[in-house]
Image (cartoon, rainbow, N blue to C red):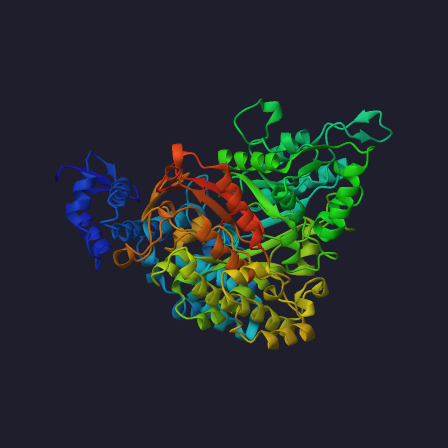
């Protein structure tokens, strides 16, 4: 072996030394149960050759360790993470010891990857204090393999052309904290310390745009963009331009195209007939796919359409694999909008009538603003012989929708009446016309008539984060983390830039936030609870505290810094809370209790208003859950060890504390349908001012001939509506158990 030489990172060669491998692996395995240095070496079976790169040897050790992660040997996930961490520090700093924070900042500003404004906000002595007394680099050893891989590949600032990485995880966290609280002056060290501790110890989870961008010259960190098109070429073009702007800034899009008239509609004097929605959806699709989101993820969008649109039968099949390219627009997702009248038609055996929006004045607006007015107009237009229309039995419409939802997994639903009546806004002043890419955002929007529309045009942005419920042991703990999340995200709204005027105006007027939940499955498992009725009381208690402390944090911030400009367009501004507007059928599931001092909060809101028009949104959390060693958002895990497919390969993720809770987790495909899960979502929705990315999941093996009956899907859909559900996201079937796709959406 002494004749074999290894090429070091510096380019120098040295004799191969097996003891170096031993020392690194012994360090990586230290204090971990059920792992073996020799097992890793045996797995690697290192084949040495002359001038083999030391980095190649290290990569082989990481890969071999990751392959050893199983239900019986879960701790190899920490060994693999430590090996990646070791490699990262060598790559970034040249050795295993990080540079001082001031040196890292200066180096990265010189490299053009950090925002130079940070040195205008902080003195060198302040940065030295942060370096010496706040940053804790040892926390890099707390990551799992999946978490560290996601951190390395998606979030650490890097040159994606040559592979240069400029920071390590704890530097990322402290730089985000410093950036967000730079304007807090006298109290900022307090908030920097507390926020850094919260995010680096995984109590607060941050979304992709903040993790990847906040500290860089890119100043757009909102996860979700909600925009709509009016029924004009100018508006359609302005919408497309806005799509490109925000796709390039790492945002996921919700696009409302429901106002656009149907195929065959008259244009002008009738000398020209309209080509319909599909050509314009292809136009939007091209804009969405025109660029990747900063090299971090591909562009993605969901298009929102009323179920009563004249082209429903052609629109509902846009994603399926049948038909020709001319009749399909597959690279976007679609959501159809329903309301009470549509469900009544289903339950009474009635019909749903389809119209072109331009033929039925007032109907589209009433669909969102006034359900009684909508029904009155809808029935009036159904009786009008002069109006172009067609109809189908409601059962057939719902069945078509559910069939396409089942086959594609990516046809979504919005109940627009619930989104408005149980939303944060006064419906007739600021109606909700759509949701976002992942179906959790409910914010007002108004179509642009030009890209620089300074009149009525409104693009809504939502800035996200989530609280790790799995680490909360008492509802009172929410107070601290809810305050930090609200203060940080609110500060970000003033720090970031806005490429479109309509988005800046809307954000400054409304200041919307969306704080969600991760690790719910672990939260339940460690209490011996499953996704069923037995969990409702506990979920209700914790959800109430979580919701209360988020609203209280924003109300306190309003007293300190002023309420949002359009405070009186919110229900909060009138002292109306989510617990005042939820669907009262939820009381059938769990008796309503008020454990928190809501009365005092109502008084405070009426006097001083709310700083942020929205506070809650329960979004997917694929990537951030991996980083935080958490289960995905509110979802039950598919397996104790899930194999997640990403652009970087397959990563094994183990549920938290599997050693002790192996038999406590309520795995997705062990559940007898989604009913228990939907009831928990109903209880959560009671306290949420926006929406929840609710999935429906079915195991075909539980049904005759491995086919999910339409009657079952319809029952669950009606249950979801009955208890006040707003949006349905994915339709999952058990055809790849234990494997989860890392979707290119706005998942945080």
Q: Position of residue 548 (x, y in %)?
A: 54, 69
Camera-side residue of 153 and 692: 692
Can residue 162 be seen in this snapshot? Answer: yes
Vertical side of 495 occupied by 653: above or below: above
Q: Quadrant of the N terminus?
A: top left
Vertical side of 131 occupied by 358: above or below: above
Q: Residue furthest right?
A: 269
Camera-side residue of 167 and 474: 474
Which of the 4 image quarters holds residue 616?
bottom right
Q: Position of residue 516 (x, y in %)?
A: 51, 58
Can residue 156 be seen in this snapshot? Answer: no
Vertical side of 385 occupied by 606: above or below: below
| Residue 525 as seen in the image, left or right of residue 544 | left
Camera-side residue of 90 and 298: 298
Q: Position of residue 129 (x, y in %)?
A: 43, 71
In this rendering, the count of numbered labels is 0
Q: Residue furthest top?
A: 324
Q: Position of residue 301 (x, y in %)?
A: 58, 41
Q: Residue furthest front?
A: 348
- For image coordinates 34% across by 55% down, the residue present is 143
| Residue 161 as seen in the image, left or right of residue 569 | left
Which of the 4 image quarters holds residue 61?
top left
């Amino acid at each position: 072996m002494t004749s074999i030489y290894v090429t070091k990172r510096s380019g120098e060669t040295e004799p191969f030394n097996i003891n170096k491998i031993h020392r690194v692996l012994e360090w990586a395995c230290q204090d971990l149960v059920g792992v073996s240095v020799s097992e890793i070496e045996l797995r690697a079976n290192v084949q040495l050759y002359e001038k083999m790169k030391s980095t190649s040897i290290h990569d082989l050790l990481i890969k071999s360790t990751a392959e050893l992660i199983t239900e019986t040997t879960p701790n190899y996930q920490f060994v693999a993470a430590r090996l990646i961490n070791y490699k990262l520090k060598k790559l970034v700093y040249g050795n295993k010891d990080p540079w001082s924070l001031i040196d890292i900042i200066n180096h990265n500003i010189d490299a053009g990857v950090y925002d130079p404004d940070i040195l205008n906000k902080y003195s060198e002595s302040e940065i030295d204090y942060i370096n010496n007394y706040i940053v804790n680099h040892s926390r890099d050893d707390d990551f799992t393999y999946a978490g560290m891989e996601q951190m390395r590949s998606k979030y650490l600032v890097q040159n994606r052309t040559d592979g240069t990485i400029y920071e390590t995880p704890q530097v990322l966290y402290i730089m985000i904290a410093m950036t967000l609280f730079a304007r807090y002056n006298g109290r900022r060290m307090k908030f920097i310390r507390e926020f850094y501790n919260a995010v680096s110890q995984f109590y607060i989870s941050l979304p992709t745009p903040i993790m990847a961008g906040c500290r860089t010259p890119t100043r757009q960190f909102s996860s979700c963009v909600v925009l709509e098109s009016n029924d004009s070429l100018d508006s359609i073009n302005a919408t497309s331009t806005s799509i490109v702007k925000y796709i390039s800034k790492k945002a996921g899009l919700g696009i409302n195209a429901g106002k656009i008239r149907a195929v065959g509609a008259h244009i002008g004097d009738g000398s020209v007939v309209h080509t319909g929605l599909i050509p314009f959806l292809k136009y939007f699709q091209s804009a969405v796919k025109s660029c990747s989101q900063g090299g971090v993820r591909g562009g993605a969008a969901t298009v929102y359409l009323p179920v009563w649109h004249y082209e429903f039968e052609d629109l509902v099949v846009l994603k399926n694999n049948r038909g020709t390219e001319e009749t399909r627009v597959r690279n976007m997702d679609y959501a159809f909008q329903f309301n009470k009248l549509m469900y009544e038609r289903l339950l009474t055996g009635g019909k749903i009538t389809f119209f072109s929006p331009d033929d039925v004045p007032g109907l589209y607006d009433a669909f969102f603003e006034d359900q009684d007015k909508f029904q009155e107009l809808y029935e009036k237009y159904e009786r009008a012989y002069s109006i172009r229309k067609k109809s189908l039995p409601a059962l057939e419409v719902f069945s078509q929708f559910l069939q396409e939802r089942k086959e594609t997994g990516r046809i979504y639903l919005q109940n627009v009446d619930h989104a408005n009546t149980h939303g944060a806004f006064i419906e007739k002043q600021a109606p909700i016309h759509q949701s976002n890419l992942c179906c959790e955002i409910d914010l007002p929007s108004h179509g642009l008539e030009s890209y620089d529309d300074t009149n009525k045009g409104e693009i809504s942005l939502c800035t996200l984060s989530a609280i790790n419920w799995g680490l909360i042991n008492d509802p009172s703990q929410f107070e601290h983390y809810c305050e930090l999340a609200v203060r940080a995200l609110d500060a970000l709204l003033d720090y970031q830039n806005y490429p479109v005027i309509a988005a800046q105006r809307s954000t400054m007027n409304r200041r919307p936030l969306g704080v969600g939940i991760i690790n719910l499955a672990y939260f339940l498992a460690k209490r011996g609870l499953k996704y069923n009725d037995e969990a409702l009381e506990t979920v209700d208690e914790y959800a109430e505290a979580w919701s209360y402390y988020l609203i209280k944090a924003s109300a306190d911030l309003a007293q300190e810094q002023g309420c949002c400009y359009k405070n009186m367009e919110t229900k909060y501004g009138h002292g109306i809370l989510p617990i005042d507007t939820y669907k009262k059928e939820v009381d059938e599931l769990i008796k309503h209790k008020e454990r928190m001092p809501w009365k005092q909060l109502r008084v405070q809101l009426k006097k001083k208003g709310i700083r942020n028009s929205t506070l809650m949104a329960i979004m997917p959390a694929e990537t951030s859950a991996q980083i935080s060693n958490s289960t995905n958002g509110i979802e039950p895990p598919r397996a104790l060890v899930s194999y997640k497919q990403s652009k970087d390969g397959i990563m094994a993720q183990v549920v938290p504390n599997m050693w002790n809770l192996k038999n406590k987790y309520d795995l997705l495909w062990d559940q007898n349908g989604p009913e228990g899960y939907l009831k928990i979502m109903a209880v959560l929705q009671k306290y949420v001012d926006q929406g929840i990315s609710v999935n429906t999941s079915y195991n075909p093996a539980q049904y005759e001939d491995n086919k999910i009956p339409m009657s079952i899907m319809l029952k669950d859909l009606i249950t979801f509506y009955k208890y006040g559900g707003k949006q349905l996201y994915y339709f999952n079937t058990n055809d790849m158990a234990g494997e989860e796709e890392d979707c290119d959406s706005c998942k945080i």
